Amino acid sequence: MTSTSVAPEPPVTAPVAQHPISFSDAWQAVVSQNDALAAERANVDRARYLQEAARDMYLPQVTASANYTRLDKAIEIKPSDITESMPAGDAIAGLAQLAGINPAQIDQLFTSRLTDRDVFTSSLRAIWPIFTGGRISAAQDIAKGQRDEAGYLLAMKQQGKFEDLAKLYFGVAMTQHVLQTRIDVEQGLQKHFEHAKKLEQQGQIAKVERLQAEASYDKAKVERQKAARDMEIAQVALTKMLKSTESVLPATRLFTNESLPPMTAFIEKTLADYPGLKILDAKSRQAKGLIDVEKGKYYPEVYLYGNYSLHEDDSLAAKTAPDWAVGVGVNIPLLDRSGRSDKVKAAHSAVTQINYLRAQAEQDLSVLVEKTYREAMQALEEYQGLASSLSLASENLRMREKAFSQGLSTSLDVVDAELYLASVRTQRSAAAYQYVISLSRLLAVSGEINRFNQYQQFQGVEVQS
């Protein structure tokens, strides 16, 4: 009996990566090129500049000023003004009468001009605070807290990007495993289909057996194509994240470890170093700084001041005025309308709020670490526990193929054995992927991203396709 089926297509091999990249190199690319991280670094720079600006608050303020004034008339002093306003004026008037001089002539002869109508002055002025009730030091503490907060925000963003990269990178690695599994299934079912055709031609199996083999082979091709598309989609996401001009594929394979450190080690490290808790500590310092700022409004301000004239007119007033002056000033707040008392209470409430938030955050982090740790251990146990199932599935497939060739097994038995082996391989790949993702989250929240290579290169066991 001859078959009318068309010749099967040759199996498609796995695509070759145009640009293989290791996980450590991919992480370096994210750190150096990611826009979100660059934005956080700019925020750190901004906070650093603001902190440096706060240091200048202890310096004196020196200003150069110039003024031009137009008066309605020049300022002059006449003898007649003296006669009207001073006790000695009567004596001067009497002497003028004895000398036979008109008082108007005396005004013309002895008038002194103090300033012209056009007055120009310029000077240097300096104010130097020497006591502000602690407000300057409090402002500097707030600026330092803001800089620390910006740095911890950057660290948190890096942790998030590390987890994102692990999901995309090893997601592609898992789809590679799945694709290779589908390629192997397609090749195995193609071989089974070829064998079934020969047996049908020899009259050893019924047509339905050959049709079963053909249908299974055609479905395997569809599944392989779907797996290839899934890998392409994951590859595109990874390529975009790395901002690569070429398509990238992982050079680092999925891996597992024999065991993990105790869960308490991860919890202790997380509670000690997690940037989110450090952010709350920085906010607490800022709130305490606000308390000091508001309390400082109750204290007087003491400052030094000085003035030095840079330009003098030819007028009498300018010549008689001193060239410089220095002194000490005090401002004592008697009645303040800024609500300093309630602002102190509000700042205390902010500190209390932050303390409660930190306590809740510690509890949530402990739960997160424990949950992630147990997920990692579950995935590791699943991967290791499926080793015997993989051996059984491989042996079962070998026996079914042998039995089919001897007419002791059906085509459906062979197909089921092939698909069961594929499902075990896929399940192991998924378990390894879940383990790597949980491990990356554990290392991220505990601030040990740099130890990922140790788990992967020195302690890791690569997952075979």
Image: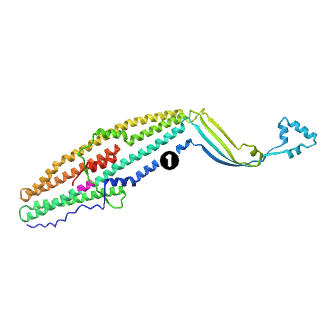
Magenta span includes 402: no
Span shown in magenta: 173-178
Q: Nearer the viewer, residue 269 or 4?
A: 269
Q: Nearer the viewer, residue 17 or 258?
A: 258
Q: Nearer the viewer, residue 151 or 58?
A: 58
Quadrant in the picture for residue 81: top right
Give the x, y percent position of residue 89. Answer: 86, 37
Q: Is residue 349 left or right of residue 451?
A: right
Position of 379 relative to 224 (above/below)? above
Give the x, y percent position of residue 391. Answer: 15, 51
Give the x, y percent position of residue 298. Answer: 56, 32
For label 1, the residue is: 49
Residue at 27 percent across and 62 percent down: it is 16
Give the x, y percent position of residue 91. Answer: 88, 36
Mark 1 belongs to which amino acid? Answer: Tyr
Q: Secondary structure at mark 1?
A: helix
Secondary structure mostly taken by the magenta-highlighted segment of the chain: helix
Position of 183 relative to 290 (above/below)? below
Q: Is residue 362 left or right of residue 177?
A: right
Residue at 63 percent across and 43 percent down: it is 126
Task: Answer whether residue 215 is visible to the viewer in this image.
Answer: no
| Image quadrant occupied by the C terminus | bottom left
